[in-house]
C-alpha cells in the first residue's frame, strides 16, 4: 500500500482536545530489557503509542503485540502510533496493527522500511503516514508531539517531546553522541526541551564496558583502512544494511584504500531509499552491486526486474569476483559463504565483523565460525555502539534537568541510580502519572 500524505488525515488529527486532569503512561514492554519498546501515553481519555518493537530474541509473532485498545480493533481513543526510528526492536510488531491507524514516522525511515519489504520479513509499508520532521510539532487531539532528530545507528531517528494537559514527557528513543551525526546531539544539549516533567531515557550501555562504546565512526574508518590496506585478497564485511553511518565509514575507507565497495542489492536499495544523494549509491563510480543467490531468487519470485535493472551498469557477477578480489571490499552475510567458495575468490580474504559481538557468539553461527577457520580467514571485530555512552547519557540528563528520570531500553534499570538523580523505576504494564 502506498503511504498517504498527512493532509489526508487533517480532520483526524485536529480533534478538539478534551478537558483533562493530567497525563498517564504505561510501559508495555522495555522497562527492564533492551528492545521491544512500547509505551502508551494517555491524556483526556485519548491515547498515543510510542514505538511497537519486537523483542530482540524473539521471532515476529502477532501474539507478542501488546494488548493496547485500538491495536487490533477500531477504537476512537487511539489517535496514532509514533515510530521513533527504523530498528526492529522499535517497529517490528507494527506489521500486526490494524489498517488505518495513523503512523508517525520520518519520511526516509518509512521509505527504508518499504524498500526492505521485498527482501526481509522485517520490512513494512504503512497505509497512513504522518511524517516526522525535526522540531516540527504535530497535534493529535490533546497531544503535541515534537520530534528531535538524533544521532543513532538507524537513519532518520527521533527523540520525542510529548505534551498534554500541562505535562511534558521527553522520550529519547535510541540515540548516541559519537556517530557521524554527533552535531545533532550537541544541538540537543544546547537547545533542550524545557520544563520536562519526566525524561524517559534509554540506557542500553548502563552496566556495560564503557571502552567498547566510546569509539567514533571516524576512528573506525582508520581501523577499516588499516585492514583494507593489509589484505592481499577480498575483504568481507558483515554489518547492518540499515546502519547508514557504518556504510559511509566503510565507503570512505574503501576510497582511501583504492578499493571498490561491492554492495548487495538489498543494501543498494536501502541507500537509494534514504533519498540522500550524498550517501554512497549503487550507481556510483567505485561501487559495484552483487546479487547473492537468495536475492536473485527473490527478484525472480517477485518479478523485481526493474529494481535489478537500476544497477545493471555497476553489477558484478560471480565469475568476476576472483579477478576483482584484490581491489574490492564486499558486504557479506554468512548465507553467502558457499557461493563465494564456488566463485573461488577467497584466497587471501579477510573477514571484518561490524555488529554487536554478542550476535557472533550465538550457537546458530557456530558453523560459520568453523567455516572461517576451515578457510583460514582471519576475523577482526570493528564496531562501536549505536547507543549513548554513560557519560553522554549524563550530559543529556544534566541539560534537560527533568523532575523525574524513568529508565527504559536497559537490561540494568537499577544501575541508573548510580549515575543519575531523581530516578524512578517503573514496571511493565503499570500505569503511572507524569
Image (tube, grey):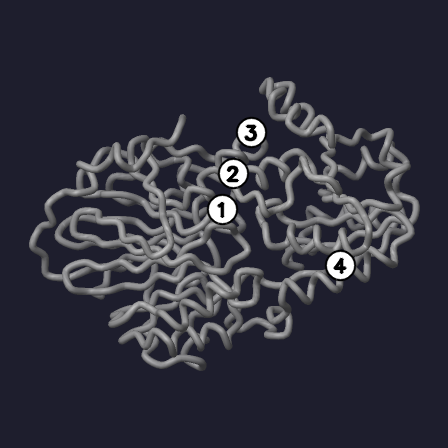
SS at circle 1 = helix
Q: Where is residue 125 in the image (x, y as percent from the top left)?
A: 43, 33
The answer to whether 274 appears left or right of 406 in the picture is right
Earlier-in-chain disc, 2 versus 1: 1
The quadrant of the picture occupied by the N terminus is top left
Name the quadrant containing residue 75.
top left
Q: Which of 319 and 365 is in front in this view?
A: 319
- Residue 224's disc is 4
Q: Nearer the viewer, residue 396 or 273?
A: 273
Q: Find the distance from the CA under tag 2 to the CA under tag 1.
A: 7 Å
SS at circle 3 = loop
Residue located beneath label 1 in the image: 88
Label 1 CA crowd tier, 10 Å (few <14, some 14–19, many 20+): many
Residue located beneath label 3 in the image: 118
Q: Position of residue 313 (x, y in %)?
A: 73, 28
Q: Label 1 near label 2: C-beta < 8 Å?
A: yes
Q: Nearer the viewer, mark 3 or mark 2?
A: 3
Earlier-in-chain disc, 1 versus 3: 1
Q: Where is residue 80 in the image (x, y as percent from the top left)?
A: 27, 43
Q: Which of marks 1 and 4 is in front?
A: 4
The residue depicted at 31 percent of the width and 53 percent of the height is 136
The furthest residue to the left = 19
- Residue 122's disc is 2
The residue depicted at 27 percent of the width and 63 percent of the height is 169
Report if residue 60 is visible in the image. yes
The quadrant of the picture occupied by the C terminus is bottom left
Q: Find the distance from the CA under tag 1 to the CA under tag 3.
A: 16 Å
Amino acid at each position: 500500500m502506498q503511504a498517504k500524505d498527512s493532509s489526508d488525515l487533517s480532520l483526524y488529527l485536529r480533534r478538539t482536545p478534551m478537558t483533562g486532569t493530567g497525563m498517564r503512561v504505561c510501559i508495555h514492554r522495555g522497562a527492564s530489557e533492551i528492545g521491544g519498546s512500547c509505551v502508551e501515553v494517555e491524556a483526556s481519555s485519548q491515547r498515543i503509542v510510542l514505538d511497537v518493537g519486537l523483542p530482540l530474541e524473539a521471532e515476529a509473532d502477532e501474539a507478542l503485540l501488546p494488548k493496547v485498545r485500538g491495536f487490533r480493533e477500531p477504537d476512537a481513543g487511539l489517535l496514532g502510533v509514533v515510530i521513533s526510528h527504523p530498528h526492529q526492536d522499535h517497529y517490528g510488531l507494527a506489521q500486526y496493527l490494524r489498517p488505518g491507524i495513523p503512523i508517525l514516522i520520518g519520511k526516509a525511515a518509512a521509505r527504508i522500511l518499504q524498500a526492505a519489504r521485498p527482501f526481509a520479513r522485517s520490512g513494512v509499508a504503512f497505509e497512513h503516514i504522518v511524517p516526522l520532521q525535526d522540531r516540527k510539532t504535530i497535534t493529535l487531539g490533546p497531544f503535541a508531539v515534537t520530534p528531535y532528530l538524533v544521532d543513532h545507528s538507524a537513519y532518520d531517528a527521533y527523540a520525542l517531546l510529548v505534551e498534554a494537559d500541562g505535562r511534558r514527557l521527553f522520550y529519547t528513543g535510541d540515540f548516541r553522541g559519537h556517530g557521524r551525526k554527533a552535531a545533532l546531539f550537541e544541538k540537543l544539549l544546547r537547545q533542550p526541551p524545557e520544563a520536562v516533567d519526566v525524561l524517559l531515557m534509554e540506557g542500553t550501555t548502563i552496566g556495560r564496558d564503557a571502552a567498547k562504546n566510546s569509539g567514533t565512526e571516524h576512528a573506525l574508518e582508520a581501523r577499516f583502512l588499516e585492514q583494507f590496506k593489509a589484505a592481499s585478497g577480498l575483504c568481507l564485511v558483515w554489518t547492518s544494511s540499515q546502519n547508514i553511518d557504518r556504510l559511509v565509514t566503510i565507503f570512505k575507507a574503501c576510497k582511501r584504500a583504492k578499493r571498490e565497495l561491492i554492495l548487495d542489492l538489498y543494501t543498494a536499495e536501502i541507500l537509494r531509499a534514504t533519498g540522500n544523494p550524498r550517501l554512497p549509491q549503487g550507481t556510483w563510480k567505485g561501487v559495484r552491486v552483487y546479487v547473492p543467490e537468495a536475492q536473485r531468487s527473490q527478484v525472480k519470485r517477485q518479478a523485481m526486474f526493474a529494481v535489478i535493472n537500476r544497477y545493471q551498469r555497476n553489477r558484478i557477477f560471480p565469475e568476476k569476483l576472483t579477478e576483482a578480489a584484490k581491489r574490492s571490499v564486499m558486504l557479506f552475510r554468512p548465507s553467502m559463504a558457499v557461493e563465494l567458495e564456488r566463485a573461488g575468490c577467497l584466497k587471501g580474504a579477510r573477514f571484518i565483523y561490524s555488529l554487536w559481538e554478542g550476535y557472533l557468539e550465538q550457537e546458530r553461527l557456530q558453523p560459520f565460525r568453523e567455516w572461517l577457520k576451515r578457510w583460514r580467514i582471519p576475523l577482526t571485530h570493528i564496531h562501536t555502539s549505536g547507543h549513548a555512552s554513560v557519560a553522554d547519557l549524563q550530559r543529556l540528563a544534566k541539560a534537560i534537568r527533568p523532575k523525574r528520570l524513568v529508565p527504559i531500553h536497559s537490561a540494568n534499570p537499577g544501575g541508573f541510580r548510580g549515575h543519575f538523580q531523581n530516578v524512578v523505576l517503573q514496571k511493565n504494564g503499570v500505569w503511572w502519572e507524569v
